[in-house]
Amino acid sequence: MDEIEWKRICCPIDFSQPSQDAARVAARLSHRFGSELQLLHVFQLPVYSFLDAAVTLPASVVNELLERIDSQLAQSAREAEQLGAPKVLTEKVDGAAHIEIVKFARETHCDLIVMGTHGHSGVRHALIGSVTEKVVRSADCPVLTIRPLSRRPEGRG
């Protein structure tokens, strides 16, 4: 049987608790396998069309948002390094989350995607869909999904 080699791990992070849980798992896997860990944040800037013109956020608002994303990513990277990840890189991209995650993982030759699930089910899941589910269906590499810690049965962690 071939040995698993995860040289590059992608962990999409939206700064929610489930994605932070996934980042911790990804950092531990990165440590165990000596892998590079890439923390990815995907955002979408709102653009409104009005008549024949597109209206976007003012540059000052966009810059503030990007600075906050960079700050959060830096904090997540520090936490991953404290958990033993040997090399942590961060990236932010604008676009539809599931599309950009799959594209990023493909273009950076990631061997594994580790991502959290929000645990939505029923009507809420049907209405908003699941970024994780879409990534699982379209990624070129394995996807490890991490359920929210608060929704796990007793005795599992």
Image: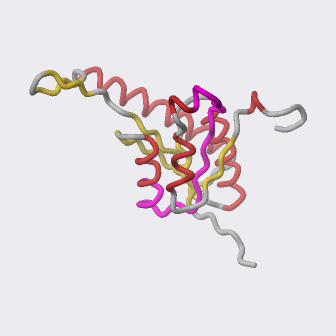
Residue at figure coordinates x 58%, y 31% from the top left: 125
Q: How many marks?
A: 0
Residue most toward the left? 52
Residue 47: percent from left, percent from top: 25, 27
Residue at figure coordinates x 57%, y 55% from the top left: 9
Residue most toward the right? 155
Question: Magenta includes 146?
Answer: no
Residue 28: percent from left, percent from top: 70, 49
| Relative depth, front residue between 67 and 98 | 98
Snapshot colouring: secondary structure
Residue 18: percent from left, percent from top: 64, 33
Residue at figure coordinates x 57%, y 53% from the top left: 113
Q: Is residue 93 above or below residue 150?
A: below
Q: Is residue 92 left or right of residue 47?
A: right
Question: Magenta includes 106?
Answer: yes
| Relative depth, front residue between 122 and 112 | 122
Q: Which residues are magenta?
A: 104-125
Determine the image quadrant of residue 76. top right
Quadrant that contains the N terminus: bottom right
| Relative depth, front residue between 47 and 80 | 47
Quadrant that contains the C terminus: top right
